[in-house]
Amino acid sequence: MAKSEEKEVKEVKESAAKPSEEEKLRELIGGARDEKKAAMAEEAAASETATKAERFQSFIKENDISYFDEPQALDDQFHTTIFRSRIEAKGQVMPMAIFIDDSFFTIIRTQIATGINEKNVDRIKGYLNTLNAEYKMFKYYLREDGTIFLDVCIPFADETFDPIMIHTLLPILVKQLETVYEDLMAEVWSKD
């Protein structure tokens, strides 16, 4: 073999050993894909070990939701965390809180009215029972201290907990209050 042929064969072998631009790109994409899979697996593992409250807090931060106060962790047997906010319906701003704990239930609770006159308690309880029979998802009740609350109870096992579902229910809650608030308050303020 002549020297020029040897040189050509050597150059061909060297160029064959070097990855092409396309191969480099494929390798880069594959590496990025592998990194993304690893990050997603790590995130999924972290989310599985995170509590429901921690997952809800992450959801709030990731989605830049700013209408909740700083969460309050209680030192109780269920490791309850309270996410407080406010809901506006019919021009009234009402305290609302989401209670997330180790139990099977997450509760969205709205305080509708306080200071109910004892003379009206039986009539108001009857009206609240009518609302409860009409609206399956919402439960109205009157506490002994004269406060009316509206609860939405959402069952979630740890592995099925879904912050998006909670966030989706909030506008439905507002719509419900818009629907019943005036009639409910007419019952509360009635002078029977």
Image (tube, rainbow, N blue to C red):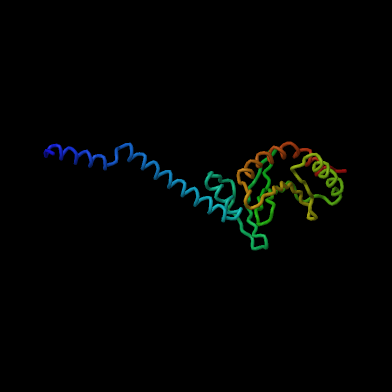
Does 153 sit left or right of 23 as displayed? right
Percent position of residue 120, x then y: 85, 48
How many numbered discs sit on the rendered protein?
A: 0
Examine the rendered structure and indicate whether residue 127 appears above or below residue 51.
Answer: above
Which quarter of the figure is the C terminus placed in? top right
Q: Going 80% across and 41% down the picture, which residue do you hit?
A: 131
Residue 92 at what x, y percent from top left?
A: 69, 42
- Residue drawn 33% across and 36% down? 22
Relative to the observer, which residue lies in front, 100 or 93? Answer: 100
Examine the image and state in which quarter residue 73 appears.
bottom right
- Answer left or right for 77 relative to 32: right
Toward the viewer: 19 or 12? 12
Q: Quadrant of the N terminus?
A: top left
Q: Residue at x 36, y 42 (%)?
A: 27
| Outermost residue toward the left in this view | 3
Q: Is residue 39 left or right of residue 126?
A: left
83 or 158: nearer the eye? 158
Residue occupying image coordinates x 57% and y 51%: 57
Counting from the top left corner in percent of width and height, residue 14 is at 22, 42
